[in-house]
Image: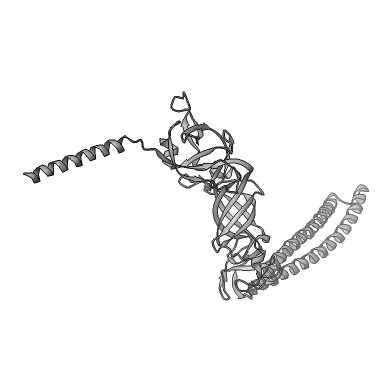
Amino acid sequence: MQLTKKFWIISTVVIVALIAAGKWFGGRETLEQVDTEQVAVRDIIERVSASGKIQPEIEVNITAEVSGQILELPVKEGDRVEKGDLLVQINPDLYEAALNRAQAAANSARSNLASAKAQHAQANAQFFAAEKSWQRTQQLFRDKVLSQADYDAAEANFISAEATLTAAAESIRSAEFAISSAEASVQEARDNLSRTTLVAPQSGTVTALVKEVGESVQGNGFTAGEVVMKVSDLSIMEVDVEVNESDIVRVGMNDEAEVEVDAYLDHTFSGTVTEIGNTALNAGLNGFAMDQVTNFSVKVRLKPESYAGMLEGMDGAASPFRPGMSAKVDVLTRRANAAVSVPIQAVTTRERDGGDGDDSELGVFILTEDETVQWQAVETGIQDNRNIEIQSGLDTTMRVITGPYQSVSRTLKDGDSVEIKDSKTDVDA
């Protein structure tokens, strides 16, 4: 009986204690914990980021202009060549024979011209005799010495001699045209023969070798033939990147750029925008491919001075980069020096006072001295990866709420009391 009574007393005390604790803790107001940061002056650089591949700015495809078997290939991939060096020798037998035939045809045409000139001289003599005979015949006919039949025969002989002379003159012109055609054929055959020898059009490095000695190549003078090799000037390298259509309008010629190459993660190289594509990469002959992302090609030339120190000990290499290496490019499009700025995550949107729900404004939450927040509308400028320029609405004496994201973007209201859990004072230069 005493144990039962004691049990109920203890139970009652515990229940009363729990109720009191619930009232005490339940009645206390829980403040929202937030991060803050001081408004600061920073240099902000707007960037457009893109990825691409490194390639030589000048790269020449060595293609076959005539067909045949490769007899000589005195270079290999990676070799340095100078302008005029022999690169490929194609079997010239067929083209030497064609040149001989063309030269023989030209000699035949010259012989025909000489024969035509001789015939013209003979026809001219015959015309002279016929003309004199015709003149005498006319006089004799006027003197009524000749008959009408003799007169007509003499006239016909003169007309025939005149036609023969004209034909002989035209034969000379025809022979001259034949010589021009034959000489053109000789030149064509000579050019085709010269095309069997491929030499370096520029100094550079053999960066790709597609064919080997003994293989055949196809080519003609009207369309591009098969590629035998590539010769590149590795002293001037560029990065070809794809920039999204939303960013391309911010990229300008000669903009500075920072380049990170996957093969050299501990280096950042500098570059300059040298070319901006005018047409989207998804454009085809039949229009634009609607199912593809619209990107534009931008080429960034790497500045040699930014990697000059890496060439030491590379055995005279023109560049530490190889065509096809992956790279990431940040194009520096705009800059704001000594700009009042805050972290990007501090800026959010709220419905404007008196708005209808569709009228919103950009702003930040300012931390007041009594640890409440105050909404402040701002005007923003450019931004980098971390901070955004504030053109009006803030000064460096203020602190802004930077997080958590849910609080800044949704739950915080003007006048709310908060508890500071992290206060940042460092300023990025």
What residue appears at the point 46 percent right and 23 percent down from the top-left corner?
354
Q: In which quarter of the image is residue 109?
A: bottom right
Outermost residue, front direction? 2
What residue appears at the point 59 percent right and 56 percent down from the top-left corner?
259
Image x and y of residue 294, in percent: 51, 46
Count the labels in the image. 0
Image x and y of residue 319, in percent: 64, 65
Q: Where is the N terminus found, in terms of image quarters? A: top left
Image x and y of residue 15, in percent: 19, 40
**Does residue 78 appear left or right of residue 288 in this picture?**
right
Q: In which quarter of the image is residue 326?
A: bottom right
Asked which colour scheme the image uses, the reply is one colour
**Does residue 301 appear left or right of residue 36 in this picture?**
right
Residue nearer the viewer, 141 or 285: 285
Residue nearer the viewer, 379 or 200: 379
Q: In this view, does 276 lie above or below 196?
A: above
Residue nearer the viewer, 371 or 355: 371
